[in-house]
Amino acid sequence: MSTTLLHPEVALPKDFLPLNGTDHVEFYVGNARQAAYFYRAAFGMKLVAYAGPETGRRDRASYVLQQGKIRFVLTTALRPDGEIAQHVHIHGDGVRDVALMVDDARQAWKETTKRGARSIREPFEMQDEYGRVRLSSIATYGDTIHTFVERGDYAGPFLPGYRAEPEDLIARPTGLLYIDHMVGNVGWNEMNRWVDFYADTLGFSLYQHFDDKDISTEYSALMSKVMANGNGRVKFPINEPAEGRHKSQIEEYLEFYHGPGVQHIAMATHDILSTVSQMQAQGIGFLKVPHTYYTQLEQRIGKIDEPIEELERLGILVDRDDEGYMLQIFTRPVEDRPTLFYEIIQRKGSRSFGKGNFKALFEAIEREQAERGNL
């Protein structure tokens, strides 16, 4: 079963929380300097800004990385106490803040908190010689938050308190363009609670729905609902475990992350063959599916532009819906804990999430779970 958003030409109720997209994703990590080097050398993201003791911040250091419209902020604690160190102690390296671009941070906070969101930071303003930024934050699942960022009057490298960094000679860009969607894992029977949270508190709508009949293997299962904001620029699939013979990937994540959190970030490209080839050459490991997946691929999804043998060499999956097809591939976890990973996606008309690939993908994940002794 799937439900899609109404097409733009259909009249929709006024959006009380207009979002312009994802502003940035902030990670709390154990060593931001080293993590930044990994994302620069392997993913090709450029170091564009920095904040730390040299800029007047005494408790943390933050590195801002960018490629296309994707912006990551890697933050580490400089002292053993405080929320950053505690977050890393509990979760390992992981996503703390999925920040959203808005025209009015105060209004965004007001509309969401009056609908039941828990406030993390009331609206406040920061200024420097480049202008001013207004920010506010609310809580979502686990220890994850959403910060509303209003930067229409700001021309600096990132936020006040950050200095611009010179040209990055380490970064080797791979063609990543923007965040397509971001997936959250929540606990048993928690999916609908958080689906309702995004619907009631942020005004999102159900975009697609997958149950355990869609996402299951011989051993494990999960359920997922995809929530999207009014203009479709922000999409958050929410996963929960489902009953299976063995431990699902969602249960493994929840065990090692010690609670709900962001499972993976999907980043779009216009040329997935080139992007994945370069990322592999730069050290990124991807999940592999067996040869049998590709033997019937053309019969299953029809004619496509890309050579099947090249897709198989790289391990790229393909799926088709009524509007076109899409190509996708998933990295192995990028932390030692089997938690956060990435998806690289190229859409050729399709607005789906690769339902036809679920079985092959989750069997690949289970092979890795078995190697870790966690299946």
Image: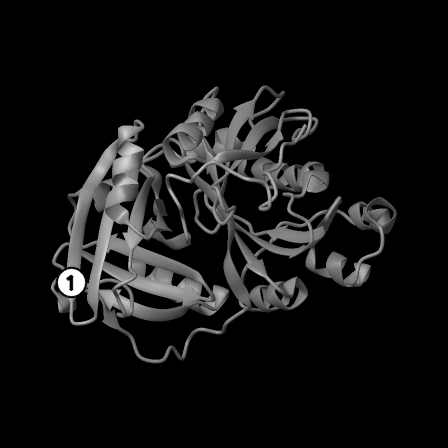
Mark 1: secondary structure: strand
Q: Is residue 153 left or right of residue 199?
A: left
- The quarter in which the N terminus is drawn is top right
The residue lying at 60 percent from left, 46 percent from top is 9
Q: Which residue is mark 1?
A: 127
The residue lying at 49 percent from left, 65 percent from top is 42
Q: Is residue 112 left or right of residue 10?
A: left
The residue lying at 47 percent from left, 66 percent from top is 68
Q: Position of residue 157 (x, y in %)?
A: 29, 69
Q: Is residue 358 visible?
A: yes
Category of crowding for the residue at label 1, using alpha-carbon neighbours closer than 10 angstroms: few (below 14), some (14–19), many (at least 20): some
| Residue 70 or residue 296, whichever sits in front | 70
Q: Quadrant of residue 129?
A: bottom left
**Amino acid, disc 1:** Gln
Is 265 placed above or below 51 here? above
Q: Is residue 183 left or right of residue 154?
A: right
Is 71 placed above or below 335 here? below
